[in-house]
Amino acid sequence: MKDHLDEKTDTLRCPECGNVVLVNDYERAEVICTQCGLVITDRLVDPGPEWRAFDQDQRDKRSRAGAPTTYTIHDKGLSTVIDWRDRDSYGKALAPRKRAQIYRLRKWQRRIRVSDAAERNLAFALSELDRMASQLGLPRCVRESAALIYRKAVEERLVRGRSIESMAAAALYAACRKYKIPRTLNEFSDISRASRKEIARSYRFIARALAVRVNPADPVDYVPRLVSKLGLTVEVQRRAIELIRFASKVGLTSGRGPTGIAAAAVYIASVLLNHKKTQRDIATAAGVTEVTVRNRYKELLNKLCLELAL
């Protein structure tokens, strides 16, 4: 196959017609040109395992590789981990002398995993990030994205002079905004050791320094979660989303908090569909004040020309 590689582009090319669109036939172990049908090589190497697995249990038992690399661990999961259980590979208990040796190895292994101040900072921040993500119930993709943002901040030396908690919470908040997962700064401040003001300041600093492109929060993203908290029906959710989309067309959502707009739309939809909830209940579920719900509610009524019998 090396004879048919293009020296300039380092891609496989058909020697007969020069076509680069080729097909790998793994059943016959051949590489075939899609244009002229020439068999370029008949010794295609299969990079997969030599064993077969018919379910997940067999795949886990027969697999000889470790866990995949991840950004949520400071060394990306590539280091050796000595298990805390004092047992050998057969599950038998270790002898006292062997147990003392393994204890010393485990202690030194923990020490050498973190070699300098930057790695110590990263190890503590990623553990804090994982703790907050677990409390908020965030998916794996958000944790990986937040860990990558924090790693870039460490590489650019943006964490100096700032608390690790606020920077980790800001990175996680930026990842939530990126994946359009509705989480407010108040929720992050409740589970973090940093205040809401510190997290907001760190988030603005990270977004400006790293040029993180985050779209404005959409009030529609907050509606399903708010409806679920209040125990309302799907019809209320659908009507609230329609109200928000109509309000965005007339320019009511710009410059206003997305949670307040979502709470007001849910309140109007619940009243229209006879699923009345008090403004206090909706404000508590949305994490805003009753005054905010009332003001957004009045603005929607004036613009949308709705008349509700209160």
Image: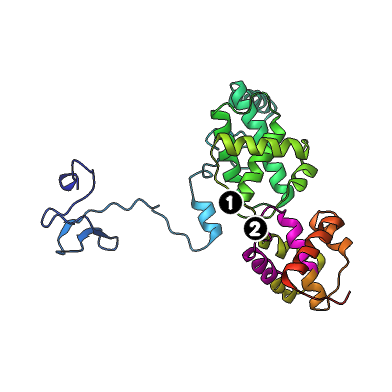
Asked whether, in this view, residue 216 is left or right of residue 235, the answer is left
- Closest to the observer, 297 or 4: 297
Viewport quadrant of the C terminus: bottom right
- Residue at image coords 17%, 64%: 35
Q: Amino acid at mark 1?
A: Asn
Pointer 2 residue? 218
Secondary structure under badge 1? loop
Does the magenta segment cover residue 232? Answer: no
- Closest to the observer, 100 or 288: 288
Extreme residue in the left direction:
16
- For label 2, the crowd category at 10 Å Cα-Cα, with few meaning under 14, some 14 to 19 and many 20 or more, is many
Decide if residue 117 is in sight here: yes
- Residue at image coords 77%, 40%: 196
Which range of residues does the magenta coloring cover?
Answer: 240-267
Asked whether, in this view, residue 159 is left or right of residue 63, the answer is right
Does the magenta segment cover residue 254? Answer: yes
Up-down: is 71 above or below 23? Answer: above
Asked whether, in this view, residue 26 is left or right of residue 114, the answer is left
In contact (CB < 8 Å): disc 2 and disc 1: yes
Secondary structure under badge 2? loop
- Residue at image coords 57%, 26%: 157
**Residue 58 pos. (x, y %):** 52, 57
